Amino acid sequence: MSIRISQIDKTYGHKGSGRTRALAPIDLDIRDGELIGLLGPSGSGKTTLLRIVAGLEQADGGTIHFGEREVTQVHVRERRIGFVFQHYALFRHMSVFENVAFGLRALPRRQRPSNGEIRTRVMQLLEMVRLAAFAERYPAQLSGGQQQRVALARALALKPDVLLLDEPFGALDAKVRQELRRWLRHLHEELGFTSLFVTHDQEEALELSDRVVVMSNGRVEQIATPDTLYREPANRFVFEFLGDVNRLEGDVAEGRLTCGNASVSVPGVEPGRRELLLRPHEVHLAERSIPAAHLPVTVASIVPVGAEVRLELEADWLEEPWLASVSHAEFERLGIARGRRLFALPSRLHGFDAAGAQNVALPVG
Amino acid sequence: MIAATLRRQASRRVLPGFGLSLGVTLTFVSLILLLPLTSLVGQLSQLSLSQYWFLISDPRILASYRVTLLAAAVAALFNAAFGLLMAWVLVRYEFPGKRLVDALMDLPFALPTAVAGVTLATLYSSQGWVGRWLETLGLPIAYTWVGIALAMAFTSIPFVVRTVQPILEDLPSEVDEAAVTLGARDGHAFRRVILPHLWPALVTGTGLAFVRSLGEFGAVIFIAGGKPFETEITSLMIFVKLQEYDYAGAAAVASIVLATSLALLLLINLWQGRFIRRLHGGGA
């Protein structure tokens, strides 16, 4: 079922006393079967938006459609949604089986399946979340990851049109989170429901979503596929929020940015004082400078992390050190050690101003 | 030598002052709780078993048990319903004056019970503000068991409110929301999701209110009037016996009240323990 959100806005607080705008009018179209991540820092309005879609909160204005059906004024219990809470919100006094069966048992008598049918359906769902052996346990006897799987089975029991998840893996440790993420992705492909989930973890959003909605201060900053988002961020906020950032500030004249004894050619950048940004993996290192870039740096610290080595680079033309990630092969080839003097060669520089984004590719590699 | 020192260190508790604090606690428990109880048993020991039975099965005393139990039961049930409602209102809604209402809940604990008794008696007597009207409707309150139940309810309602309130505060609103997103109607969600959570606290609170009502004296005697066989409560009988210098008789009746209360408290504790074990994952 597709979801169409148009002009939804929300303000908290009473007139006069500190009103805060939680959502500026927001438009969002979600296609049938899409998995969408709402990504943003806390206070960006992502949870509010999710709760408005669920019907747990009312918007001040705007409309929401599920497919052709307008649900703006429809009560949450009639919306046919499944909702998964960050802290599972399981019914502690009921067994796992009864938790999953709750929605089916709550149906009005005429629509309610027989006990046998409920049993079959619940056991099916528990098989699906691989918890069939735990049907008679109580939630307190399960681990966090298992509890969240029960919550998911419970939310799917009524075959909802839309599945909404509020920071579903936020309370779990990294390894379980990773596992559940892959599993949810798989489940999504298998069952094909439309879902919308909230997260503040960029890695989670990029890994799980078909498209990511980046939000800040109650506004949508960019809606794009993870790939586009990472390569072509629409603005500075998105760029900075999606990963580590290095800054380069200097004066641009005749296509070259100068900063102390460092300089780099930036074709196409308007003259004047400019700040350009780049990611750690866009910083390459060499033993000598090239005509296009003269950026002398000193290696300040070395941290091997998995497949790459993270370096901290210092220079007197830099206000704060740069981060760079290089491969182990590169690391050994250059014989990098703490205190070694090298030259940085940026492969890409990103500039943002009120007009939009500007990406400068440099001929290094 | 070294081994002995190590063993000494290992057996030492991390929290200091165990011996002293336990000693002081036990001393005070003995002085304040056990000593009076011992003297009660001492009084009883002067009676033979048949004398004891004769004293506690006197028809007038039997009638007082009935009145006390009935009124306390009605008061406890009334409090279960209204205490739950008050706790719900105090936890789930925001309204001006909420803190004041919250503080008022403790008033029955703070007010001397005799003052409460006199106030209730004047209010509900046939000349009182409220009693006058109820009398014309054919609902006399003062000097009937209804009045007794009313006084008991007044003094014991904080037990229900104050036991249910923290449990309700602990219940995240996400749990209600989860029930609603699963299509549950309000009544269904309350019965199947909220009430089971509150159940242990509600039963405990109601039980405590009941036990407290059984022994209530000050608040009740003024409104009860003390008609033999009709509105005499058991604690009044003890008082009457004491005034007649019948210490053994008073002790005999008191022992019944005490035994009932202790048994009830024990039952509540056992039951609650079982329920809570289940919630925290100790098997069905």
Image (spheres, rainbow, N blue to C red):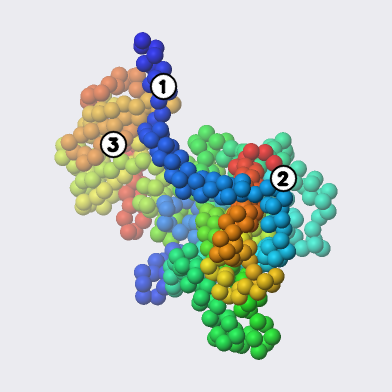
Q: Nearer the viewer, mark 2 or mark 1?
A: 1
How crowded is the residue under tag 2: few (<14 C-alpha within 10 Å), some, or many (20+)? many
Secondary structure at badge 1 equals: helix
Look at the image and tell me whether residue A175 can be seen: yes
How crowded is the residue under tag 1: few (<14 C-alpha within 10 Å), some, or many (20+)? few
Give me the disc on residue A322.
3
Q: Is residue B136 above or below residue B271?
A: below
Amino acid type indicated by mark 3: Trp
Which chain does the residue under circle 1 lie in?
Answer: B
* Marks 3 and 2, the one that precedes in the sequence: 2
Q: Nearer the viewer, mark 3 or mark 2?
A: 2
The CA span between labels 3 and 2 is 53 Å
Instruction: Identify the residue under disc 1.
Output: B10
Are the residues flagged by discs 1 and 3 from a single subunit?
no
Q: Residue at x 31, y 35 (%)?
A: A323
Which chain does the residue under circle 2 lie in?
Answer: A
Amino acid type indicated by mark 1: Ala
Q: Residue at x 34, y 27 (%)?
A: A303
- Whole-percent x, y for residue B188 in the image: 69, 61
Amino acid type indicated by mark 2: Phe
Is A113 in front, or is B247? B247
Query: Is residue B166 toward the left or the right of residue A326 in the image?
Result: right
- Whole-percent x, y for residue B17 in the image: 37, 34
- Whole-percent x, y for residue B221 in the image: 57, 71
The CA span between labels 1 and 3 is 52 Å
